[in-house]
Image: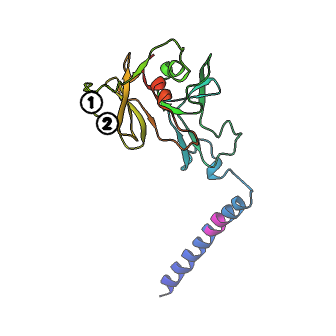
Amino acid sequence: MAGGLQRTVVLLALGSLGCERGCARSWLRDHGVGGPTATSTPGHVPVAGIDCPDGIARCTEGTVETSRLARIGQPCRGPETACSCPWDRVGDCARGCVADGLEVVMDRSQATRQLCLPDPTATASRMRGQSADDAGPPAATCEEGQLYRCANGFVADCSAHAVLGSCTRGCFTEGASIDEVAREETVSRVAAFAILCSR
C-alpha cells in the first residue's frame, strides 16, 4: 500500500515538473518571448495557399503577359507584388489587344500573335455563307463554361449552339476555347475568330 502511494506521489511530481517546463515554454511563446512560432519557422510549408496556374495568356492595354506556375502561402504578409500570382511580359501589340483583359489558355509562344489585333489585310477566318445548298460544317460541340470553341478548323458560338465560320489556317490549337468570364463586356464573334484562328 505504502509503495503504491509513493509511486503515485512520484508520478504526480514528475508530471508537475513536465508541465512547469512545457507550460512555461507555451506561455513564453504565446507572449512573444523565445523562439519562432510554427508559421515563421524556416522551411515550414504553410498549409493554406493559392496555387497560381501556368499556361494562361492575357492582353491588357497593348501588353501581352503569360502566367507563371507558383504557390503563394496564406496569409501573405509581403508586398502586393509578392502576394499576387506572377505574370511575365512576353510582347507588345502595335495595334492594341483583340479583347482587353481576356484570359485564354495558351502557350506563351502563341500569345502575342493571337491576342494582338491582326493586320487588317490578314485573312485568318471567314464567316460561313448562308447559301441554301451549303451543307455546312459539322454540328457545334462545346463543353460547359465555354463561350466559343475552335475544332476541326471551325469556330462555334457555344451559347447559340451554332458554327460561325471556318479558319483559313485552322485553329491555333485544336479544341482551343474562350471560356465564360465575369466581365461587363462580351467577347464578340470577330474577336473570337481573331483569337481562335491560327495566324
Q: Nearer the viewer, residue 155 or 36?
A: 155
Q: Amino acid at mark 1?
A: Pro
Badge nearest the viewer, 1 or 2: 1
Q: Nearer the viewer, residue 93 or 34?
A: 93
Q: Are marks 1 and 2 in contact (CB under 8 Å)?
A: yes
Q: Is residue 32 left or right of residue 156?
A: right
Residue under the image location 69 percent in, 45 percent down: 77
Q: Is residue 7 left or right of residue 77?
A: left
Query: Quarter-wise, where is residue 101 in the image?
Result: top right
Task: Mark yes or no: residue 49 visible.
Answer: yes
Q: Nearer the viewer, residue 131 or 158?
A: 131
Residue 132, placed above or below residue 51: above
Residue ID for mark 2: 141
Residue 33 at x, y = what percent? 75, 56
Task: Mark yes or no: residue 198 visible.
Answer: no
Q: Residue 39: say if magenta.
A: no
**Dot 1: few (<14), some (14–19), or many (≥20) neighbours within 10 Å?**
few
Could you say which disc has been placed on residue 138 in the image?
Answer: 1
Q: Nearer the viewer, residue 107 or 74?
A: 107
Q: Residue 22: say if magenta.
A: yes
Residue under the image location 63 percent in, 39 percent down: 84
Examine the residues drawn in magenta and state their main secondary structure. helix
Query: Quarter-wise, where is residue 141 in the image?
Result: top left
Q: Residue furthest front?
A: 132
Residue 134 at x, y = what percent? 27, 25
User: What residue range appears in magenta?
Assistant: 19-23
Residue 124 at x, y = what percent? 44, 17
